[in-house]
């Protein structure tokens, strides 16, 4: 079976053995598995993002690696989509939460039912990848009146699925086509519901379709990244917006360093003090001081390098701004400083580092640049090392939620927790802990409280896991998966 071979090649999923198959009756009997349906498994808050990320990467692999001329469970021959760019792919056909299972005993996922769903009205095995994605979203947002295992944070789970799929698939994700496909399928889904569930139950579940439509509309307004797409070389190139971002910092140096001065920017200086406390704890909890090879990406004026310098055996800083590194030479005089763009030329070769840091970079960078940089840095992480970076523009923070209510929210240049999880998954890493900082709805321009009062409160709140959904600045500690 074509799908099984993809699963074996990638190690992302398994397809159980088929015990019997009756095409005339539309029945497939699989081997007995001790499994939990994905719908129920996603009700576990602690594992929901990881599991839906696995499902997204599995679907991306199916679309990318299904081979020509192989036979599906339904007996139909499929052609490959390789080399067709944004042409049709070999569809799974019914990639919904009811056909994906979690095997807790082996910590793997299993995928079944490779026949096209009757209700979508598509008989051909080829189609746009957004067809399978739409089927998954419709099944994810389906709500039951007395659902025994509700999927918590349904929108965050859906966002993570889309972000992970877009990052993992060379085809990317066309959000406009996805919205059109969901709209088309929603009508067919509603008719199917009325026919087999009855008018009352169909009406009770109509809010699921409304919720999904609102979710996709919001994604469009936020400028959801459609994924890297193209070849590996394409993913490593700068987009025009990425070039503008790097150029914006090349001429800066002393003036940027001054923005962390208490006299110039008291709020930013306070946040930096909170970050230093968090970095000290991370060092104590996760590494052995004195034996550490440290790499700081986008090192700028050397704040992070200078903070860790006395605790590490070697320090290396990489940045594209020569003027910033002139300042860094004074802040961290013993550090090796490299002026380079790692997405254009990986000058680090095969070097590995026990500690990799990247602060105030990922939210500012465009999605394509984020992905390229993250994957490069992840390759240089030592087997037992940690990758520490921050999202200082958490889109889900309390301050930004208030801004949205007031109509002042700007989605560009921000990241959600789901966006970060997609990056981490694309780099084959896992999150060890998340440290929330700056939980109060204050900002550099609107401090509202004296800095001394604000800092006293923030020190009490900092690091409290329950505030991760409200904090503006989240520090992530990651390791190899």
Image (tube, rainbow, N blue to C red):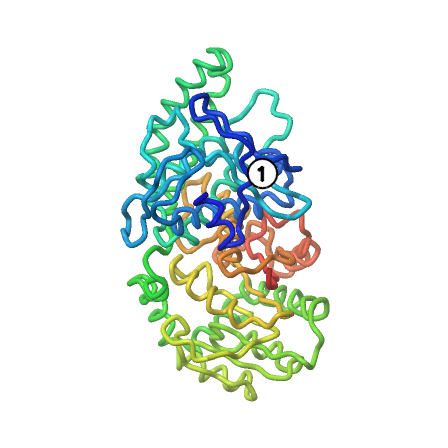
| Front residue (pair 393, 209) | 209
* Residue at point 49%, 25% (across, down): 27
* Residue at point 34%, 29% (across, down): 183
| Front residue (pair 335, 32) | 32
**Residue 44, quarter of picture:** top right
Residue 136 can be seen, yes or no: no
* Residue 102 coordinates in the image, percent (x, y): 61, 41
| Front residue (pair 468, 139) | 139
Question: Where does label 1 land, which residue?
Answer: 101
* Residue at point 54%, 53% (across, down): 11
* Residue at point 33%, 30% (across, down): 123
* Residue 472 coordinates in the image, percent (x, y): 55, 53
**Residue 210, quarter of picture:** top left
Left or right: 84 in relation to 306? left
| Front residue (pair 343, 325) | 343
Label 1 sits on a secondary structure element that is strand
């Amino acid at each position: 079976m074509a799908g099984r071979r993809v699963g074996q090649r990638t190690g992302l999923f398994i397809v159980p053995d088929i015990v019997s198959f009756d095409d005339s009756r539309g029945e497939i009997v699989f081997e007995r598995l001790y499994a939990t349906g994905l719908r129920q498994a996603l009700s576990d808050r602690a594992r929901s993002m990881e599991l839906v990320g696995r499902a997204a990467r599995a679907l991306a692999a199916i679309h990318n690696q299904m081979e020509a001329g192989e036979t599906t469970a339904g007996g139909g021959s499929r052609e490959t989509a390789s080399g067709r760019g944004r042409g049709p792919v070999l569809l799974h056909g019914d990639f919904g939460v009811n056909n994906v299972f979690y095997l807790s005993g082996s910590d793997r996922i299993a995928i079944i039912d490779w026949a096209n769903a009757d209700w979508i009205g598509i008989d051909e095995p080829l189609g746009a990848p957004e067809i399978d994605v739409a089927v998954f979203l419709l099944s994810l947002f389906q709500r039951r009146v007395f659902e025994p295992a509700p999927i918590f944070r349904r929108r965050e789970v859906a966002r993570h699925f889309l972000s992970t799929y877009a990052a993992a698939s060379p085809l990317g994700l066309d959000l406009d086509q996805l919205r059109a496909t969901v709209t088309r399928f929603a009508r067919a889904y509603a008719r199917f519901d009325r026919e087999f569930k009855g008018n009352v139950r169909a009406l009770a579940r109509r809010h699921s379709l409304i919720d999904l439509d609102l979710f996709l509309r919001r994604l469009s307004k936020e400028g959801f990244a459609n994924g890297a797409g193209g070849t590996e070389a394409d993913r490593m190139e700068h987009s025009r917006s990425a070039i503008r971002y790097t150029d914006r910092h090349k001429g800066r140096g002393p003036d940027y360093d001054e923005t962390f001065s208490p006299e110039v920017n008291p709020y930013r200086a306070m946040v930096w003090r909170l970050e230093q406390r968090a970095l000290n704890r991370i060092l104590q909890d996760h590494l052995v001081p004195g034996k550490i090879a440290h790499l700081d990406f986008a090192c700028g004026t050397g704040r992070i390098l200078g903070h860790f310098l006395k605790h590490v055996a070697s320090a290396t800083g990489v940045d594209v701004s020569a003027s910033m590194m002139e300042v860094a030479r004074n802040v961290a005089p013993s550090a090796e400083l490299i002026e380079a763009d790692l997405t254009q030329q990986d000058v680090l070769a095969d070097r590995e580092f026990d500690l990799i840091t990247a602060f105030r970079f990922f939210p500012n960078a465009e999605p394509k640049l984020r992905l390229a940089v993250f994957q490069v840095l992840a390759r240089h992480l030592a087997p037992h090392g940690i990758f520490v970076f921050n999202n200082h523009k958490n889109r889900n923070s309390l301050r930004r939620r208030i801004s949205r209510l007031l109509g002042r929210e700007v989605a560009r240049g921000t990241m959600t927790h789901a966006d970060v999880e997609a990056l981490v998954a694309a780099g084959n890493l896992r999150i060890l802990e998340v440290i929330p900082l700056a939980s109060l709805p204050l900002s550099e321009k609107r401090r509202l409280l004296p800095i001394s009062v604000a800092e006293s409160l923030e020190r009490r709140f900092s690091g409290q896991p329950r505030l991760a959904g409200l904090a503006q600045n989240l520090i992530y500690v990651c390791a190899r998966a």
